[in-house]
Amino acid sequence: MSADPTKNPEDPARTDEPGEDGGTGGGESTVTVVVAAAANLGIAVAKAVAGLISGSSAMLSEAAHSVADTVTEVMLLTALKRSEKPADEEHPLGYGPERYIWAMLASIATFVGGAVFSVYDGVHTLVRGEELGDPLVSYIVLAVAFLLEGYSLRTGVKQVRREAARLHSPATHYLRHTPDTAVKAVVMEDSAALVGLVLAAGGLLGGQLTGSGVWDGVASVLIGVLLVYVAWVLGRSNAQLLIGRPLPEAMRAGVRAELLTVPNIVEVLELTTLIQGPTELLIAAKIDFRDLASAADVEWACERAERQLRERFPSVKRVYLDPTPGAAQRRERERGASAE
């Protein structure tokens, strides 16, 4: 179809062509999550060993951070796999929303496993103090972790940029609004991990220069606050999608415009849209058909409307159209009832 000005090229929920895996980024999302999980697992062990050797609460907080991230990525992998199951009799609309349940649990894991421990450990250090050991091992681990986290972040950012470029959208806009919360979680958590590593290094350096564990405790608390923010953002995004997020206004306008190009459709009386997954959109509408249209005309109009919507928005998986009397017909019916 030719380009249409009612399309919103900057909207991340809009997709152009499905990939070989049936979506625009499902396969890439899995690779991104696997890379992040592998990196975080190794980093968590190294940080824990370094934290025990140096006696640094910030390093132990970073170890908890990496453990939480690893658990998060395992949950995200579960979400990606389970959401790919086809629709069946018990779940006629498919399993797409299940990814948001697991992603919500992943954000809770980030909060409980990382944020709570980091804040607690930091406060404990500020109150009780700590014995500082040799920080050399911690510095080495932090440097290696920074490289690994940077590589993991690079993988996620590359996917975000590819998808954003495909949709002619700024990468930051895509990241804020994408319904692919798996890649969003990886990018946010890896970004937070890099900031956390810098904070941990600052805590170690401050303690080494002053001989006080206060710097380390403050760094630990700040890491916890950072994780609280990440968990809140990811939790809110998944909650919105679980509750039911509609297509953006510009896309809804495009859907209305597309329906009105179909012969025998007079008016779109009510339009309901729902994002069920990154590549699963549902459209339901009450339609006023031409009064003189036959039953066959209405049936073929519904078929054509669905075909056109799928061509324009490839992520549309389900279209339900309900023939409904328009305002003029209702007034005529009311006048007839009054006359009787």
Image: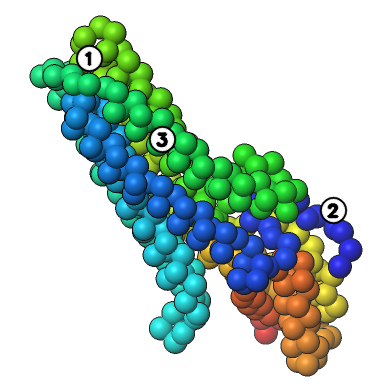
Which residue is disc 1 drawn over? 214
Image vertical order of residue 204 relative to residue 104, above or below: above
Hey, what amino acid is under mark 3?
Val
**Foreground: 237 or 161?**
161
Tell me how far mark 3 sits from mark 1, CA to CA.
25 Å
Task: Locate residue 158, reporting x and y percent.
Answer: 62, 47
| The quadrant where residue 121 appears | top left
Which residue is disc 3 drawn over? 144
- For the question of whether residue 38 can be seen, the reply is yes
**Foreground: 278 or 245?**
278
Element on which disc 2 rests: loop
Q: Residues within 10 Å of mark 3 (few under 14, many from 20)?
A: some
Tell me how far mark 3 sits from mark 2, CA to CA.
49 Å
**Foreground: 256 or 268?**
256
Hey, what amino acid is under mark 1?
Val
Tell me how far mark 2 sits from mark 1, CA to CA.
58 Å
Q: Work out whether mark 3 precedes mark 2 in sequence or the reverse, and give the earlier one.
A: 2
Q: Which residue is drawn at 39% across and 65% down?
A: 78
Element on which disc 1 rests: helix
Q: Work out whether mark 2 precedes mark 1 in sequence or the reverse, and give the earlier one.
A: 2
Disc number placed over residue 108 in the picture, else none: none
Image vertical order of residue 118 relative to residue 127, above or below: below
Disc number placed over residue 5 in the picture, else none: 2
